[in-house]
Image (tube, rainbow, N blue to C red):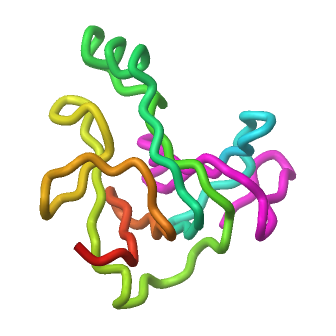
Amino acid sequence: MGFFKGREVNTGDVVHVYRNLNTGNFSIRCAKTQRVLAHAATVQIRDCTCKVSKSGRERTLQERRKRVHAWIIGTFISANKEKSEEFNRVIYYDPYKTEQFMDIEGNKPVYHLDVAHFEGSVVYSKENY
């Protein structure tokens, strides 16, 4: 995990996590100050809420230019850890195809997750279908 501008993220901090298209990693942003704290290849958080800004998504669709308008809020657990087998549910978001984070299997909207593991271009959850 690379800390951003000397900032830190600690276990238990409430953060926003989103995919950073410029770095290919995930950005970890403080929920209170909205400042980026760190970047990491993988991130795990718990007690998660999936958020999509409706106006941000509409602007993305109009301008055909991606911007930060979707993230998952939760309590920071760790970064740069390998995904264990128990993370078997795949969650994704594509502003051009969906209005909300979606479960890839059932193609149903996802609003809350107990635990989330961010890796690659998707989010994995421990929850069963």
In the rendered view, does 40 fall on the left or right side of 87?
right
Please tell me whether residue 117 is drawn above or below residue 82 in the rendered image.
above
Q: Position of residue 33 (x, y in %)?
A: 80, 35
Please tell me whether residue 4 is drawn above or below residue 33 in the rendered image.
below
Please identify the quarter of the rendering in which residue 13 is found: bottom right
Q: Which residue is rendered at x = 59% and y = 65% of the image?
A: 45
Please tell me whether residue 6 is drawn above or below residue 83 in the rendered image.
above
Q: Position of residue 106 (x, y in %)?
A: 13, 59
Please identify the quarter of the rendering in which residue 87 is found: bottom left
As rendered, which of 112 and 71 lies closer to the eye?
Answer: 112
In the rendered view, does 88 fall on the left or right side of 51?
left
Residue sitting farthest toward the bottom: 85
- Stretch in magenta: 1-28
Please state the total of marks drawn on the protein image.
0
As rendered, which of 4 and 87 lies closer to the eye?
Answer: 87
In the rendered view, does 62 fall on the left or right side of 12?
left
Q: Position of residue 54 (x, y in %)?
A: 39, 20
Q: Which residue is rendered at x = 50% and y = 68% of the image?
A: 114
Q: Which residue is rendered at x = 38% and y = 71% of the image?
A: 125
- Quarter of the figure with the N terminus: bottom right
- Quarter of the figure with the C terminus: bottom left
| Magenta-span inclusion, residue 15 | yes
